[in-house]
């Protein structure tokens, strides 16, 4: 039935760029976060992902939204284990100007939601 529902689990993460290190932050997410998710998608351990650059304002003090979707709760619950395997296989993280992630980013919040896709 084309109207059957699948409850997708979505993880939203809001990130603030620190110390005006935009180039370093974008490089990090493009060359690490995004690559890991592309590999996760190929292996079928996530449903989809998005990397969204936004403009911070007084109500939303963050610059990047990271979205990772899982096909169901079971896939979400295995995400840490599954990503650890990908991280181990990948090796060292890629950094611009050798700055460590804590030098250029701050996690503002993360929240998990469920949605029905039709």
Image (spheres, helix red, strand yellow):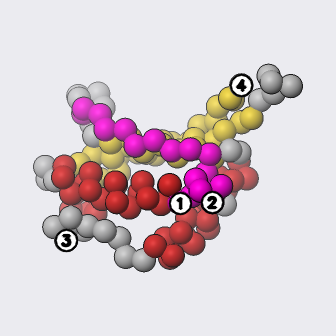
Task: Return the disc, 4 or 2, that comes first in the chain's sequence.
Answer: 2
Q: Residue at x 24, y 33 (%)?
A: 56
**Residue 118, numbered circle:** 4
Along the viewing direction, whichever of 7 and 86 lies nearer the viewer: 86
Disc 3 target residue: 98
Disc 2 target residue: 43
| Residue at the extreme top of the image, as rendered | 3
Task: Return the disc, 4 or 1, that comes first in the chain's sequence.
Answer: 1
**Numbered disc in front, either 3 or 1:** 1
Whole-percent x, y for residue 91 in the image: 42, 77
Disc 1 target residue: 39
**Numbered disc in front, either 2 or 3:** 2
Q: Residue at x 38, y 61 (%)?
A: 32
Q: Residue at x 26, y 67 (%)?
A: 95
Whole-percent x, y for residue 59 in the image: 29, 27
Quadrant hosting residue 10: top right
Along the viewing direction, whichever of 53 and 78 lies nearer the viewer: 53
Do residues under tags 1 and 2 come within 8 Å of each other at their CB atoms? yes
């Amino acid at each position: 039935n084309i109207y059957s529902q699948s409850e997708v689990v979505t993880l939203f993460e809001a990130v603030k760029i620190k110390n005006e290190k935009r180039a370093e932050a974008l490089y990090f997410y493009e060359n690490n976060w995004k690559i890991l998710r592309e590999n996760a998608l190929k292996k079928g351990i996530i449903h989809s992902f998005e990397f969204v650059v936004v403009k911070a304002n007084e109500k939303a003090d963050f610059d990047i939204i990271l979205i990772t979707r899982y096909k169901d709760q079971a896939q979400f619950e295995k995400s840490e284990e599954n990503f650890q395997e990908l991280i181990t296989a990948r090796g060292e993280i890629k950094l611009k100007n050798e700055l460590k992630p804590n030098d250029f980013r701050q996690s503002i919040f993360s929240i998990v939601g469920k949605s029905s896709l039709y």
